[in-house]
Image (tube, rainbow, N blue to C red):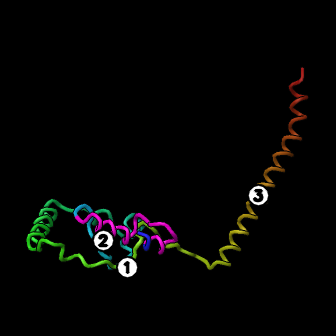
Amino acid sequence: LHTIADRHGGMVPLHSRLFAQWMHLAFPRECPFPYVAADPVLMTPSHWHGGGVDEKDLKVTPEERKRLVEESANMAAGLPAGDALVPEWSEEEMLFLQESPRRIFGGAISAAMRLILQFSMGITIIRIGFEGIRMVRSGSADKVQEFAV
């Protein structure tokens, strides 16, 4: 765990492949071995929530479910007593729930755009404030005279 924490700035990410691998080695019957995905994009939330996978593709028919259970049972029956398919410790890391940052512009252009946006928002707020003050000053004197008996 210390080695995993060293790779991530002193923290062990709970949704990482290395932590899942450590959990498998510590509790082999309760925790499955985390195999490395062929395509890391498959492990991101955006891929499964509107990122190219249709909801109907994620459903399994009862016939398919029965076939998969039978295939799994046949595979498990043919394995020796030990977990022969599980390789030794692998240092390949994958953060399952972490999206890679998407940058539309470079760092300098992005900073300039943020500065311009903040400046324009500040000017707009100041103008709205001055307009509100002007309306209160001009309208309040007329209303006081109008409602005086």
Local SS, label 3:
helix
- Provide residue 33's location: percent of width, then percent of height: 27, 70
Residue beneath the point at 32% across and 65% down: 23
Q: Residues within 10 Å of mark 3 (few under 14, many from 20)?
A: few
Local SS, label 2:
loop
In the picture, the disc for residue 91 is 1
Mark 3 in CB contact with mark 1 (< 8 angstroms): no
Q: What residue sits right under mark 2 in the picture?
A: 34
In the picture, the disc for residue 124 is 3
Mark 1 vs mark 2: which is more N-terminal?
A: 2
Residue type of the residue flagged with mark 1: Glu
Q: How many marks?
A: 3
Report the mark closest to the observer, 2 or 3.
Answer: 2
Task: Answer with the quarter of the image where residue 94 lies.
Answer: bottom left
When the figure is inspected, residue 131 is found, relative to residue 83, above or below; the finding is: above
Local SS, label 1:
loop
Viewer-proximal residue among 131 and 59: 59
Dividing the image into 4 quarters, which one contains the C terminus? top right
Range of magenta residues: 4-28
Viewer-proximal residue among 36 and 71: 36
Report the mark closest to the observer, 1 or 2.
Answer: 1
Mark 1 in CB contact with mark 2 (< 8 angstroms): no
